Image: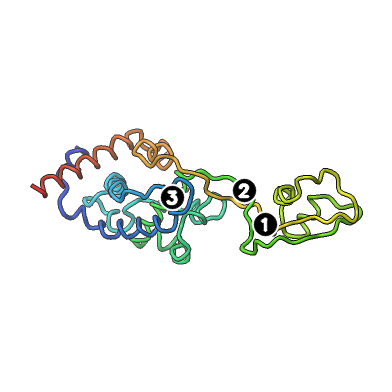
Amino acid sequence: MWEDGIDKADEKWDAYDREIRSAVDEYDRHLSRTPGYIPLDWRIVKAMVWVETGAKVAEWRVRPMQIGNDGDPGMMALLGDREGGELIVPPSLRASLSANTVQTVPAHNIRAGIGYMLMRMANFAFANVLDPDARVYEVTVQAGDSIEKIAGMQRSTPEVMKKLNPSIHMLKPGQVLKYQKASVLKVIVGWKPVTPSGIATYYNAGGDSMYSQKLNHALGSMRKRTERTCK
């Protein structure tokens, strides 16, 4: 019955196409410089919306991607600062997304759903990141100093300082060390493949054992509709 409903989808099921394309463009522009990012196929997001709700149910008009439902941890994970959402969501969008808008505004629900999916597909790590001020400074070692102590006082990191001073193995008062201002920050280092099986594993996380098959069926149904239209 579910497959039959997808296969008989009419033009009402295309109501969010423009919104999805716009949202995907926003994320693509924001994430384009992260390592290994491949522009997102908006049709896979459309398939997700079809699987999550569909034009025949009431939720379609409010929360088409179902993020923000009671008991769903995705929204708060995305809007918080502990799981990488601050790196995924474009700053201009992050300023307007809130629990209230995600739960009541379809355009925001779609954007939050895309953001949470991308957050789950991203690979994060902590790395030494230079400040915009990339100048090289010098500091004189004092009695009792260590690389860690100096790095903390000068707003650098031990790793950056060791890289700039490779021959220094034991500090002595009076030595002059180089440093750059830097921080240890969470960064995106790569991406898992954004495929139906990947989305089912990391986004749906076992909530629906048929999620991957449903996404594939929805995508196939879309292709058939396109072919019919072209003919």
- Front residue of 9/35: it is 35
| Label located before the other in sequence (1 or 2) | 2
Compared to residue 118, the image places residue 179 above or below, namely below
Mark 3 and mark 1: Cα distance apart in space: 29 Å
C-alpha gap between disc 3 and disc 2: 22 Å
**Mark earlier in primary sequence (3, 1):** 3
Within 10 angstroms of label 2, few (less than 14), some, or many (20 or more) residues? some
Q: Position of residue 145 (x, y in %)?
A: 86, 53
Residue at 19%, 43% in the rendered image = 223
- Tell me the element at label 1: strand
* Quadrant (top left, top right, bottom left, bottom right) of the N terminus: top left
Residue 196 lies in what quarter of the image? top left
Amino acid type, mark 1? Ala
User: How many residues crowd around disc 3 within 10 Å: few (fewer than 14), some, or many (20 or more)?
Assistant: many
Pick whichever of labels 3 and 2 is earlier in the sequence.
Answer: 3
Residue displayed at 65% across by 61% down = 134
List the residue tagged with mark 3.
Answer: 116
Q: Are dots 1 and 2 in contact, CB under 8 Å?
A: no
**What SS does tag 2 mark?**
strand
Pick whichever, 89 or 140, lies toward us: 140
Residue 121 in percent (x, y) is at 44, 43
Residue corresponding to mark 2: 127
The amino acid type of the residue labelled 2 equals Ala
Q: What sort of colour scheme is used for the picture?
A: rainbow
Q: What amino acid is found at the position of numbered circle 3 in the picture?
A: Tyr
Residue marked by disc 1: 182
Label 3 residue SS = helix
